[in-house]
Amino acid sequence: MPTTLVDARGQLCPKPLILTKQAIKDSTPDAPITVLVDNETSCQNVERFLRDNGMAVQTTRDGSIFTIRFARNANDMAANDASPARLPPVGNASYVVSLASDTVGRGPPELGAILTKGLLETLKAVSPAPSHLVLYSSGVLLAVDGSPHVDSLRTLEQRGIQVLICGTCVDYYGKNVEIHVGTISNMLTILEVQAAAGKVIAP
């Protein structure tokens, strides 16, 4: 059976994941697929999507090139709109909180830091809880080792709130190895989560 090759080298996240999903959709069950990427975050996003949809993944690395090999299984979900994130049902009372900065509001940074701490503390107790907390742009710095907010983010995860962190933003700040809370994600997944939510709150 011929192998489908997805050459996503040089493509910015989330394009490698989009191309992979399209290859799965166009292939037949058990058809071998190989994906080439040259970005570790994109590699992780593709791997996570495949594993979350029940596919065995074999990844090798040669310098900066990651080769991901797998075969599409019979799970139609993987070929359609599945996502590595836990998507809330459309029309329910769920909501998503999005933070695009490591400080809340447009006032002085000191005030913004206080508001951020208060927001995360409130999310620990507010009912109903959001389904997701999305961090992008400088908001990803809240999840970096040494941030005073890491423990709060871990508590939110324990409460069942999924913390999604924009991988492109993490790469921009050079903080990939310093993120040990939340899930490194991509803009495709983030938009799917926001679109499926009852509402999006962006303080």
Image (cartoon, grey):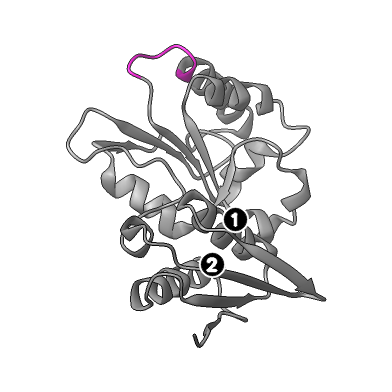
Label 1: which secondary element: helix
Instruction: Give the vertical position of 97 relative to 135 (above or below).
Output: above
Front residue (pair 199, 65): 65
Q: Are marks 1 and 2 in contact (CB under 8 Å)?
A: yes
User: Which stretch appears magenta?
Assistant: 123-128
Query: Which residue is the extreme one toward the right?
Result: 63
Query: Tag 1: residue type?
Result: Gly
Q: Position of residue 57 (x, y in %)?
A: 61, 61
Residue beneath label 1, please?
167
Residue beneath label 2, please?
13
In the picture, measured across the screen, residue 6 lies left or right of residue 147, that is: left
Is residue 157 visible from the viewing direction of this image?
Answer: yes
Magenta span contains residue 111 = no
Q: Find residue 85 and report its image quarter.
A: top left
Which comes sooner in the sequence, label 1 or label 2?
2
Near mark 1 (Cα within 10 A), the count class, few <14, some 14-19 or many ≥20, is many
Residue placed at 47% from the left, 71% from the top? 20
Q: Which mark is residue 137?
A: none
Instruction: Give the vertical position of 16 relative to 117 (above or below).
Output: below
Instruction: Give the vertical position of 57 relative to 20 (above or below).
Output: above
Residue placed at 27% from the left, 45% from the top? 196
In the picture, measured across the screen, residue 8 lies left or right of residue 84, that is: right
Disc 1 to disc 2, C-alpha distance: 8 Å
In the picture, measured across the screen, residue 112 lies left or right of residue 86, that is: right
Query: Tag 2: residue type?
Result: Cys
Front residue (pair 144, 100): 144
Q: Position of residue 171 (x, y in %)?
A: 68, 59
Per the picture, the main secondary structure of the magenta-coloured stretch is: loop
Front residue (pair 60, 103): 60
Instruction: Give the vertical position of 65 relative to 148 (above or below).
Output: below
Q: Position of residue 145 (x, y in %)?
A: 76, 36
